[in-house]
Image (cartoon, helix red, strand yellow):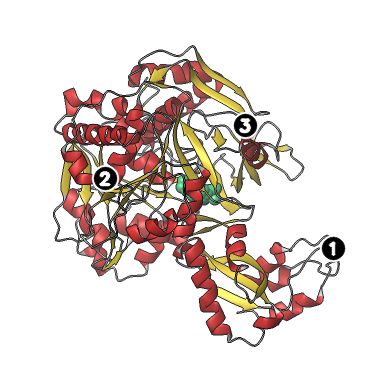
Amino acid sequence: MSNYHIKHLEEYYQVYRKSIQNPDIFWEEIAEEHFVWRKRWNTVLEWDFSKPEIKWFKGAQLNITENCIDRHLRTRGSKTALLFEPNNPDESTQHITYNQLYKRVNQFANVLKDQGIKKGDRVCIYLPMIPELAIATLACARIGAIHSVVFAGFSATALATRINDSDCKLVITADGSYRGAKTIDLKTIVDDALKHTPCVKNVLVVKRIGSSINMQTNRDKWLQPLLDNALTECEPEIMNAEDPLFILYTSGSTGTPKGMVHTTAGYMVYTAFTFKNAFQYQENDVYWCTADIGWITGHSYIVYGPLANGATTVLYEGVPNYPDWGRFWKIIEKHKITQFYTAPTAIRALAKENLKHVEKHDLSSLKILGSVGEPINEEAWHWYDTNIGKKKCPIIDTWWQTETGGIMISPIPYATPTKPTYATLPFPGIQPVLMDENGNEIKGNQVDGRLCIKFPWPSMARTIWNNHQRYRETYFTAYKNNYFTGDGALRDEVGYYRITGRVDDVIIVSGHNLGTAPIEDAINLHPAIAESAIVGFPHDIKGNALYGYVILKETGTNRNHDNLRKEINQIITEHIGPIAKLDKIQFTSGLPKTRSGKIMRRILRKIASSEFDTLGDTSTLLNPEVVQEIITNVL
Ligand code: PRX
């Protein structure tokens, strides 16, 4: 029996039991058999959730790019590693083989060194979904620089905050990006951000759209000429198992974004292991994940997990509806995609369109369908199953988080019987528990509670950059000796998990994690606004949309409300990005508050969702009268 590749349910249970009863032996066998190490570990796991301190494979040395690239060259050198499908369907696809990837990553790594980047330096990558994005992340990893990829839909302010938080020395960007029929001036956004980032010394610019841009002398350089002059060999930096590999920012329920720090060895082992099993990857498969590398899904399941398994991984630059709503299906047919991994929000948007877009295409290459990022509703699940999988492809509903680094709860295709809307069973090594509000574990089945994980797994984030205290408070204090996920979940009669959604002030909109506090902070900068509160409400495509309750200052009361709404969304776009725009904005004279002044978001959420009958007792509020006013004017 191989622990590394599970093929049926009985085997899953055996492997799972072993992983729980003897985690050290379990992970050691996987690490030994499937990866290249420069030095072996002294201990498999050392941990203490009270600090919290987690160390996997302590004492080991390695370079993740040797595992993702070099070791495949002998057997898979001419196999396609990255398959790039451009935004414009008339532009040709690029097949980048493992041999070519090796050269390009090494050249890029040498360019980074020439820019003075050394092990441990932070490099911010702000690029569209083009091959250079994957290559730049791998080039950082090659030389031990810590990459911080920022999704290229974030605004200049959001980018600057992230650059400053981790003190990035270098930014890698492009002149612009294609998004359907539009182009976006990425370099202009970077220029705006860099007015506020004294730590940045240099900017490398990829030429993608050929627009004329401002290049600041001594700071900005075109990448291509530097690559052309770079050597194609760059010795990999030898990293310690627990050296940081990357920082990736995620929203918190309060304050600034959290720079989640992922380290090298555990992240590699776990993403490779989960990729192999969740997608049952076989040598000639062509795997496509539609996420952006700017999110954790792209890091783990476009770049590191697939490449560590020598897979062919597709990078798609564009959007689902360009040039029409058949684009995804066309790509599946064109490249004979075998595994397709996308988000419920995309499935819902695609399901609204005429089925002819699907029916035109031959999807018979598909073997496995995946879903990630938010709960998948039953209707979307069945549409996906019937129309895309033709009822022949298992759907893996994969639950995980930026913080977890890899898939935590998911069916293993062909092994775990699927059940619509259920993420089903934990991956080997993962020990989920449900907690009640008093911090006691809820045992047994057919129960619901708050989802925690009680034992470490190799790819968990080790800290928040520069803020270990916040890491501890956010994840390890609510439930003693447990990692708290922030999600609610239920466990059914056979022990399957269904994730019911966030129980904190994070709202998942179109699969993007948005904290309410940063949006409120942005809105409150408007001179006419006194206070605001954001909640989520159900939306048939986005899953959730944002509803803002806004109190105007005296000076704002005579302003035209529609104009104010536009200005509010403009401020949000500038400070965070268009993904955080509000769908509905209600002006109100007050917000329901407790006597200690805390906004009662639960009441606001119910009103925004038209659940007026279950508001509960409002009489103990500081200002109960405002509830009726809000209900009367609800949008
Ligand atoms: O609420 C859960 C939801 O997305 C959150 C994590 O968001 P993020 O860190 O951006 O990572 C998304 C990609 C891994 C979780 O706390 N979530 C993610 N996957 C699922 C999900 N909710 C339900 N079902 C899922 N399959």
Which one is in front, 356 or 488? 488
- The crowding category of the residue bearing disc 1, from other C-alpha atoms within 10 Å (few below 14, some 14 to 19, many at least 20), is few
Q: CA distance from mark 1 to mark 2?
A: 54 Å
Q: Residue at x 69, y 63 (%)?
A: 601
Which one is in front, 362 or 342? 342
Question: Looking at the image, is mark 3 or mark 2 earlier in the sequence?
Answer: 2
User: Looking at the image, is mark 1 or mark 2 nearer the viewer?
Assistant: 2
Which one is in front, 521 or 195? 195
For the C terminus, which image quadrant? bottom right
For the N terminus, which image quadrant? top left
Which one is in front, 580 or 396? 580
**Residue on which the image places disc 1:** 595
| Position in image of residue 151 (x %, y %) | 40, 52
Task: Say what amino acid the circle numbered 3 marks.
Answer: Lys
**Residue on which the image places disc 2:** 132
User: Looking at the image, is mark 3 or mark 2 nearer the viewer?
Assistant: 2
Horizontal relation, residue 35 to residue 590: left or right: left
- Secondary structure at badge 1 equals loop
- The crowding category of the residue bearing disc 3, from other C-alpha atoms within 10 Å (few below 14, some 14 to 19, many at least 20), is some
Horizontal relation, residue 453 to residue 286: left or right: right
Q: How many marks?
A: 3
Establish if 377 lies above or below 606: above
Question: Looking at the image, is mark 1 or mark 2 earlier in the sequence?
Answer: 2
Q: Are marks 3 and 2 in contact (CB under 8 Å)?
A: no
Query: In the rendering, which numbered label is found on residue 454?
Result: 3
- Secondary structure at badge 3 equals loop
Q: CA distance from mark 3 to mark 2?
A: 38 Å
**Residue 363 visible in this rendered orientation of the protein:** no
**Residue 196 visible in this rendered orientation of the protein:** yes
- Secondary structure at badge 2 equals helix
